[in-house]
């Protein structure tokens, strides 16, 4: 019990960890709130609780938007360190990653402008900026899926080359990497389904998701993110 509390505290003390926890609680609240709000047989107290959870989810989402005002420089530093991906062995992975970094870099200022417009800090219409930020987010997610699929293909080839060499550690490491990429695909697909939902009506299933389904997709993605973050910490601990 004490170890679990200490792990949670360590998670909350880091920016990335806190953001992932807030994201999970945000979408989890939307999931539960959406389920309670749509139950026809639910009593008044359940419906009221559902609406409160949806409002709480909206406030957490706004909190994350404000916190992202300070993410531009860290994203820029990452993009500069990656550059054109000279260290990547595969050309496809390299250019997909470069395009992903471009989409992510452009996403932040577009969202900042949309937020500032809603907050009446600047006199522009926020609709087109929210749309542009959603398009960039969706493009980043789609590129992330393509990158993971490409990496999975390359890992399978490496696994075949390992064959019967008896390199148990190498094979187990490849399997772990493949599992991580599969989780990334599932996470990005869940987020992409929500990104399409927030597109203008008429585009695929835009605007058709109920609150509980948006919450479910976001919760799945958030939990996968927490699992991957914990797995990354475990790997780092094992290597030190």
Image (cartoon, grey):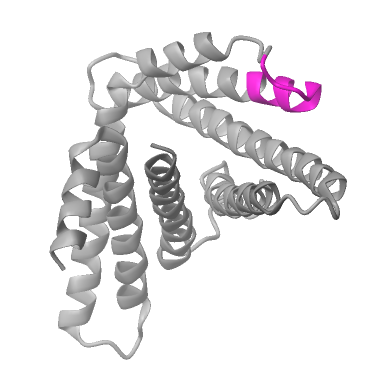
Q: Where residue 190 sits: x, y (%)?
A: 56, 54
Instruction: Name the image quarter holding the N terminus.
Output: bottom left
Q: Is residue 141 among the parts visible in the rendering?
A: yes
Question: Residue 165: within the magenta?
Answer: no
Q: Residue at x 82, y 50 (%)?
A: 165
In the image, taking residue 172 as reference, residue 39 lies left or right, namely: left
Above or below, 238 relative to 217: above
Q: Residue at x 58, y 49 (%)?
A: 180
Q: Where residue 70 sits: x, y (%)?
A: 28, 20
Write the start and end of the magenta stretch as one range. Answer: 87-98
Q: Residue at x 32, y 70 (%)?
A: 32
In the image, taking residue 240 as reference, residue 14 lies left or right, namely: left
User: Residue 44, located in which quarter of the rendered image?
Assistant: bottom left
Above or below, 159 relative to 48: above
Camera-nearest residue between 82 and 72: 82
Camera-nearest residue between 131 and 90: 90
Q: Where residue 189 sits: x, y (%)?
A: 61, 51
Above or below, 94 relative to 156: above
User: Residue 65, located in which quarter of the rendered image?
Assistant: top left
Q: Where residue 10 sits: x, y (%)?
A: 20, 45
Furthest residue to the front?
Answer: 166
Q: Is residue 201 among the parts visible in the rendering?
A: no
* Secondary structure mostly taken by the magenta-highlighted segment of the chain: helix
Q: Residue at x 53, y 53 (%)?
A: 207
């Amino acid at each position: 019990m004490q170890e679990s509390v200490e792990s949670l505290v360590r998670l909350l003390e880091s920016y990335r960890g806190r953001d992932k926890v807030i994201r999970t609680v945000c979408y989890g609240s939307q999931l539960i709130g959406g389920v309670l709000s749509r139950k026809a047989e639910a009593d008044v107290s359940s419906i009221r609780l559902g609406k409160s959870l949806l409002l709480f989810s909206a406030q957490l989402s706004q909190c994350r938007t404000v916190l992202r005002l300070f993410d531009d420089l860290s994203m820029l530093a990452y993009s500069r360190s990656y550059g054109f991906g000279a260290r990547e062995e595969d050309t496809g992975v390299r250019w997909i990653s470069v395009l992903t970094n471009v989409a992510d870099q452009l996403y932040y200022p577009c969202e900042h402008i949309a937020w500032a417009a809603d907050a009446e800090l600047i006199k522009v219409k926020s609709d087109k900026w929210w749309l542009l930020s959603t398009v960039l987010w969706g493009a980043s997610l789609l590129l992330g899926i393509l990158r993971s699929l490409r990496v999975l293909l390359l890992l399978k080839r490496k696994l075949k080359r390992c064959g019967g060499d008896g390199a148990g550690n190498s094979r187990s490491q490849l399997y772990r990497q493949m599992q991580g990429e599969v989780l990334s695909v599932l996470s990005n697909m869940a987020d992409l389904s929500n990104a399409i939902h927030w597109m203008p009506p008429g585009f695929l299933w835009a605007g058709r998701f109920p609150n509980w389904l948006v919450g479910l997709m976001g919760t799945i993605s958030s939990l996968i993110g927490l699992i991957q973050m914990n797995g990354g910490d475990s790997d780092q601990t094992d290597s030190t």
